Image (tube, helix red, strand yellow):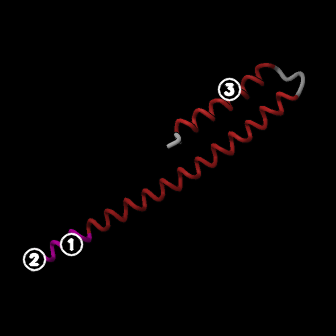
Amino acid sequence: MENENEYLEMCEHFKKVVDDKDKSIKMLLMLTHELKKEILTTYGIVRMLDREISAIEGVPCNIRHLTEDLRGHLSEYYDKLFPLP
């Protein structure tokens, strides 16, 4: 009888451990999803900004380069964080 109780307690403990890990994994997946959306949104805005700056005469070169560098950095960062399978 004592072994049975110990077994049941151990099962309950491991069930709680697994449930806690599942919650942590779900939370991390949600956070990852939100980060992906933020990076993609930022990248899209920077691409549009880069295109607009390229179409405007007289924009200083350093502004053009900063925009191009930011776009490239975001693209590389996204590819590094979320590589294709």
Residue highlighted by disc 1: 9
Residue labelled with disc 3: 69
At horizontal 26% and vertical 71% (from top left) the residue drawn is: 12
Q: Residues within 10 Å of mark 2 (few under 14, many from 20)?
A: few
Q: What residue is shown at x 62% (from left), y 30% (from top)?
A: 73
The residue positioned 52% from the left and 40% from the top of the image is 83
Element type where label 2 sits in the image: helix
Camera-side residue of 19 and 80: 80
The disc placed on residue 33 is none
Real-space Cα separation, disc 1 to disc 3, in angstroms: 57 Å
Q: Is residue 74 shown left or right of residue 82?
A: right
Residues under labels 2 and 3: Cα distance? 67 Å
Counting from the top left corner in percent of width and height, residue 50 is at 77, 32
Type of secondary structure dominating the magenta stretch: helix
Question: Is 38 or 47 nearer to us in this picture?
Answer: 47
> Percent position (x, y) of residue 11?
23, 70
Please tell me which of labels 2 and 3 falls first in the chain. 2
Q: Which residues are magenta?
A: 2-12
Question: Taking 71 as reference, is 27 above or below it?
Answer: below
In the rendered image, which quarter is residue 57 located in? top right
Label 1: state its secondary structure.
Answer: helix
- Residue 5 is covered by the magenta coloring: yes
Residue depth check, mark 2 versus mark 3: number of the one nearer the observer: 3
Relative vertical location of residue 69 with respect to residue 15 in this rendering, above or below: above
Instruction: Give how far apart the Cα atoms at labels 2 and 1 are.
Output: 11 Å
Check residue 2 in the rendering and tell me which mark sits there, or answer none: 2
Q: Nearer the viewer, residue 47 or 16?
A: 47
